[in-house]
Image (cartoon, rainbow, N blue to C red):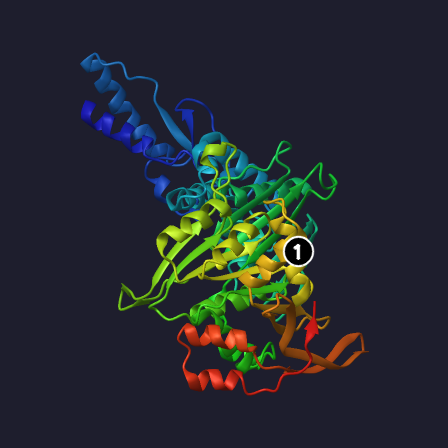
Amino acid sequence: MLGERRSKGAFYEGFGEGVWEEKEALEPASVQLSEHDKGLPVEMLPEPGVHIGSQEREEEKEPETQSDEDDGYVPPKRTVRSLQTKDLFFSSGRENREFSDVLREVQGYLSKEYSSLVTDTGSEDAKSQIRRFAGKYIQDHRISVKGMSTDELINAIYSEMAEFGFLTKYIYGEGIEEIDVNAWDDVEVQFSGGVTRKLDEHFDSPEHAINVVRRMLHVSGMVLDDASPSVLGHLSKNIRIAVLKTPIVDEDVGVAASIRIVNPQSMKKEDFLRGGTATGEMLDFLSECIRYGISVCVAGATSSGKTTLLGWLLTTIPDSKRIYSIENGSRELALVRRKEGKVVNSVIHTLTRDSENERQRVDQIALLDMALRFNPDIIVVGEMRGPEANAAQEAARTGVAVVTTIHSMSCDATYRRMVSLCKRAVDMSDETLMGFVTEAYPIVAFCKQLENKERRLMEIMECEIQPDGRRVFRPLFQYQITENRVEDGKFIITGSHKQVNAISDSLARRFMENGMPQEMLAKLLAVPEKGKEEV
């Protein structure tokens, strides 16, 4: 009897806590179930107030009680579980709720019960546990949101907590170059073709926008708060983020952010030609410059396509050339090439590191100084924005080909911009620095995004240094606009690329000294000289 009694107690204790409520056996209940009836389907359960199997319990109860008395055993007060009517159906207060309310509730629950998961969203294990625990909470509490299935609700909550909400599909989507968060309720996306579209989706509030962006910055170890309201960070090798929050922007804005997605190698030569960005001759010329040791600076404004062009040019470098790349904070270039699992080229990728500790900080100047010790054929400086411009031009004047980008408004303005950046590092006259940068970068390519959002390689220019020291700006290729009008609110721009000058004799000598074949050099010298501008 004792063994039988214990088995029954274990049977009762096996029911899930979310469905069965414990009640004393002698306590009145609206519905009290026998062990037999607990296995019945829901639709076969009796109405509230009706006792089930009372006869069977009476028959069982008397012999058990008698036996207990005979054995001298006094049974403890046992409990059974009664199924409440409210547990059989969704309660009206839990269904068709707002997603934002559900999200806050689940976030609060996980923050309280599983705080380590919320703070460690970077690991895959933590992400999977967030999905599992959030799903269990929603199912246990029978939560629903209008217009969303349970799976969709769980996925949405997971995306908000472990990923980046509605931004996730755009960040990792195809053909997207930039996401601009102007305010919590104003988000726009720029596609590879230059088209920009306002999104119907937005954050729920300024606070929601800040929380999502903070989660993005957490990946790169950056903190966004009142002490650091302006932050640069990255999500991966090719995704970088610039963020501003209050007090730099208004409180009702929440946060302003620019998320730049760069995938230079996704572009092929045919893509440039098909889109009218440049001609084959222009692309081949720039590629040959880098191949044969001539430094090139690609200039342009933001979103002009300069980094995309740079990325493609670097894919044309022969495997025999040793490349040393320097990038600021996040890696956008992927230059290592493999064949059958084996690396076939020679590449060293380096990144700057920011730190409040000056001894731990690594800037582009330090990496440029280190570059020359690695015997590179080509040094790639992702972007010149500060005093590193002086170190870069010094490296270029040692005979190593330096390839870089810079923000500028034209080819000739590029040199003046270089001078102003160099002056942040050294105290020299403009004339002296102009001599240095023109010697360092004989070739400048200027990219521009037109009003119709199309990108064009507007000009390739050589700066020729003549024997008497004079500098001559020699345009080699130009995009010449023949028509510019507005029709039905759209910009119509027509033009064509032309080769306007041959390379100079001095540049031809450098090409020859660096190993360019004669037949290739002859093509570059075929166009008659014209249109020189002296400076």
Nearest the viewer among 1 and 439 is 439
Residue drawn at x 61%, y 80% is 276
Nearest the viewer among 244 and 290 is 290
Residue with the most extreme front position? 468
x, y percent for residue 7: 23, 30
Nearest the viewer among 476 and 222 is 476
Specify whether residue 475 is in view.
yes
Q: Which residue is mark 1?
A: 431
x, y percent for residue 47: 50, 40
Q: Is residue 174 left or right of residue 491?
A: left
Is the residue 71 above or below the residue 306 in the image?
Answer: above
Q: Is residue 110 left or right of residue 299?
A: left
x, y percent for residue 490: 77, 75
Residue drawn at x 62%, y 41% is 210
Q: Is residue 336 left or right of residue 168?
A: left
Specify whether residue 418 is in view.
no
x, y percent for residue 167: 57, 54
Q: Quadrant of the N terminus?
A: top left
Residue with the most extreme top position? 72
Is the residue 166 above or below the residue 307 in the image?
Answer: above
